[in-house]
Image (cartoon, rainbow, N blue to C red):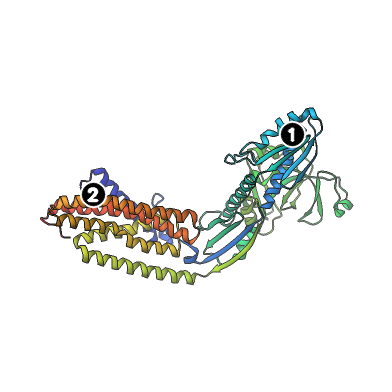
Amino acid sequence: MLIFPRWKVVMIFGVILFGILTALPNFLSEEQRNSLPDFLPSKSLSLGLDLQGGVHLLWGAETEDVVKARLDNLADQVADIRRNESGLNFKNIRQDGHSVVFTVSREDMVDLAREKLLPLTQPGATAGGLMGGGVTEVEMTRDGLDFRLTLTDQGIEVQKRDAIARAIEVMRKRVDPEGTKEITIQPQGSDRIILEVPGADDPQQIIDIVGKTAKLTFQDVVTTVSQEDLMRGRAGPGVTILDSKEGGRIAVRNRVIVSGDDLTDAKASFDQFGEPAVSFSFNTSGSKRFANHTRDNIGRPFAIILDNTVISAPRIQTAILGGSGQITNIGTTAQAQELATLLKAGALPVKLTVMEQRTVGPDLGADAIEAGKEASLIGFGLVVLYMFLTYGRFGLAANFALITNVVLIMGALSLFQATLTLPGIAGVVLTIGMAVDANVLVFERIREEQSAGRKPFDAMAQGYSQAFSTIIDANITTFIAAAILYMLGSGPVQGFAVTLGIGILTSVFTAVLLTRFILSTWLTRARPAKLPI
């Protein structure tokens, strides 16, 4: 237990050095952090809402719209089977509750219909053809010639859960497109989302940018509808009349040429007249569809539609083959930047409504930080004093390990950008007290072994050997509790669990390895007749 091979010594010093480097940015100014070489860690502690102040928003998600969209897609898939399969005819396709129902026109086509419809009921088959984790989302039943495709409870839950997950990702990209604000977004229940933005002071600005749907489509303009029909809202089948941003109304075909889902990039720019615009580019499939349409429709207008409003309807002058373009008539530069951010983040899959909002001032955070510092310093000082008075030279080794432990905790929190909250500070204070617990167990065991007549080397070796299993068991059980708190808790509870969990890991390292290395090195060189403990 007291012999350290070279690789273990290198590992101990490597961990300590890495901890110092990751903790160092917390003691530097922002300018100094930015000037650090790229290969060095430069992230400082991320403070939570209760320490830094900011905006807290609780959003409600209308997930029933997702179920309706899934049923619409299911009905479209049934219609596609009817169109693609010669002789197979489905009559009266309609929605009934959470089901799509229809009738097969001929009895001899029932088996063929069942065969073609079966893939829609396979486990994991979703609207987009993605796997849903083996969940059967659709069940098929038949009564004579009547078929019914019903969304299962599990399927509905999958759709809602997926919509919430996608909404969270879109919100993250809209609020923090650069990934530098350290925001917190997490689901609450099945239809609510918590958003916390540390450092923000204007909740309405965040509400505005998150609440916009930002559904972008490119659709063909129908030029044969008269002005009178446009004003009365009358259009033929497959045509919708929309308001234009420039005034008046425009008729467009329902079929979407390219949608915002095909965008790979969008950024604010300027048009040829120096006016604000948004430049965009499509993915491969979107580029191909856009190129084919513009090549086949030279001289005809097409509509650029954002949230059911035609923001531009340019005339196609030539085929656009590069997979990129520009949206003009945006407004101000700030509006162009906002639109680019929305388009790049994508459209929200569900409508969101603010259910609760509050702004936390930085003064409360400053008081909490100061109180946390005082508590940490007092706790640290008392522990250091107790260890020195109780165990003497052995206590000094434990105190050095304790200082290293605090540095490692700070470095780990900075490296992983775990948000430090007020309960997180409580976790750090608790860890300071727990950090020497393992050393106390070992030292008391060494005392017992020496009192029993063992020589210094044997007493220390037996002390560490006998206490090792107890230390590991105690820390594993505490770590399990911290893990459960993290998985089942949210917000401040998770912050406490993170600091506690990290503190347990670093405490085991400093107590089991670092303190033992220091004491064994001293014992090998000093060779005392009796341990000063």
Measuring from the top left, give residue 514's x and y in whole percent: 26, 53
Disc 1 residue type (three-letter): Ile
Q: Which residue is nearer to you in this view: 22 or 69?
A: 69
Number of other residues with Cα within 10 Å of mark 2, as a class: few under 14, some 14 to 19, many 20 or more: some
Q: Which residue lies at the image location 79% right of the left edge and 42% below the top edge?
A: 300
333 up-or-down from 146: above or below: below
As displayed, is residue 109 above or below residue 54?
above
Q: Nearer the viewer, residue 488 or 219?
A: 488
Cα distance in 3D space between marks 2 and 1: 72 Å
Rendering quarter of residue 43: bottom left
Q: Residues within 10 Å of mark 1 (few under 14, many from 20)?
A: some
Which quadrant of the structure image shows residue 175?
A: bottom right
Which amino acid, by three-letter code, is at mark 2?
Ser
Quarter location, residue 201:
bottom right
Assign the C terminus to one quadrant of the image.
bottom left
Q: Which tag is nearer the camera, tag 2 or tag 1?
A: 2
**Residue 341 pos. (x, y %):** 61, 54
| Frontmost residue, 367 versus 289 | 367
- Residue 78 lies left or right of residue 505; in this view the side is right
Mark carried by residue 318 = none
Q: Secondary structure at mark 2?
A: helix
336 relative to 481 in the view: left or right: right
Q: Nearer the viewer, residue 485 or 407?
A: 485
Identify residue for label 2: 465
Residue at point 87%, 54% (across, down): 232
Residue 527 spot, x, y in % from top left: 12, 53
Badge 1 element: helix
- Say which mark, if any, is on residue 81: 1
Mark 2 or mark 1: name the one nearer the start of the chain: 1
Residue 526 position, x and y percent, is 13, 54
> From where the camera sits, is residue 394 visible?
yes
Q: Is residue 360 above or below residue 90?
A: below
